[in-house]
Amino acid sequence: MRAVVLSGGGARGAYEAGALSYVLGLAARRPGPWADIVSGTSVGALTGALLAAHIDTPLDARTTLDAVWDDLELERVLRIGGEQILGLRRLILGGAKPAGLFDPRPLARIVGGGIPWPRITEHVAAGRLGALTITATHVPTGRPTVFLQRRSDLAHPRATPKRNTLTDTTITLDHTLASAAIPLLFPPVRIGGDLYCDGGLRQNTPLDPAVRLGARDVLIIALATSKEPIPLASDRYPSAAFLLGKVLDAFLLDHITSDVDELRRINRFLADGAATYGDDFCARMAERAQRASSVAFVPVREALVQPSENIGAIAASHVARLRRQARRFTPMYALLSLIDTGEAEGSDLASYLLFDRQYTRELVALGKHDAAANASAIEAFLDR
């Protein structure tokens, strides 16, 4: 089975949309649904739900994705109203109601409004989609929760990591907004009486749910650049905004490196075992795992698309532009002043928050370029 795996990163999701736009164009040339499993976290959860709803109509998915990221205004998405100002005390000290620095409703309308949610259930029931998984973090325990909507004949994973909770459900807008609720920036979302927030804190690249559901070919759209980070001058102590950007990198981006490395290590181990002990090595290992009621190691082929340019550097140039344009002594000017650290050539914090059309258009173009550079791997994924 084929799975598309989508990681998180706030406004960096525009890169994901650009890469998928290229993929969906190739998928439209092939008959039938192009993926069996869609697995998403954070902004990748919103994108994943859209793909699942249009799994049989990739051009519709591409049109919607392009429209979402092509018409964003920072002040319309990151809105600070009276409710947020009054909730600052709860944000710092806690309270009976969830609070966040920004109002989540504009983002819900912009992204969630373009998803025909009943179609996900229709595709699962008709067998066009095997499963949709959305990962969020359970606030009371800090454990990852994987919300799973699956086809009836697709076996529930027999074993999951002890730190994970896997819940069968019907995926809704609330599940995706919970997965995308970056702590402090957006309020956690209540589902079934419990609070959930950004799934990227513990499982930003949700490879594990896809593989345990039976995926043997995975297309991973990552939001972490393969280039070295831009260094800070050694004679300066960083600001809180600079450090917060690095914290978000650690939470939301660094998982992809370890997850893909682990996937490749397992593949090399299985290939070495087959070369040493014979072609039936993997089958014998699987039989032994089945007798022990554990999960078998299996080869998983991956196609990886990730940014060829430093997205933090792209964000920094757009923050400087917007700051020059903004009226002084307004909330938006204050926000731009906060995230424009001026301490390096990049701005990691801004790269997550800059829901501005000129910035997102540049990321979409970069995503399309990088996907095209990996066309052979993507086509091999689609043809298997």
Image: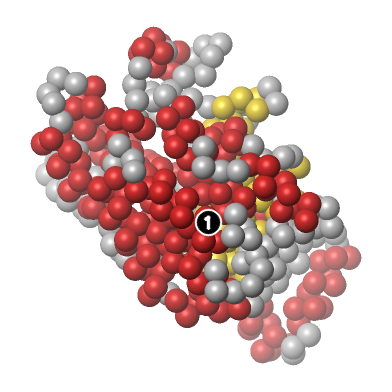
340 over 100 or under it: above or below: below
Is disc 1 surrounded by few (<14), some (14 to 19) or many (20+) residues within 10 Å? some
Residue type at mark 1 is Asp
Q: Could you say where residue 243 lies in the image, as x and y percent from the top left?
A: 29, 38
Res. 8 visible in picture: yes
What residue occupies the far right of the structure in this picture?
291
Find numbered disc 1 in the image and state the secondary structure of the residue it sits on: helix
**In the rendered image, which quarter contains the C terminus?**
bottom right
**In the rendered image, which quarter contains the N terminus?**
bottom right
Q: Could you say where residue 308 lies in the image, as x and y percent from the top left?
A: 32, 65
Residue drawn at (15%, 20%) of the image: 329
Q: Which residue is at the front of the view, 355 or 180?
A: 355
Residue drawn at (51%, 42%) of the image: 114
Report whether 340 appears left or right of 143: left
Report whether 353 appears left or right of 303: left
**Residue named by callout 1:** 60
Res. 198 visible in picture: no
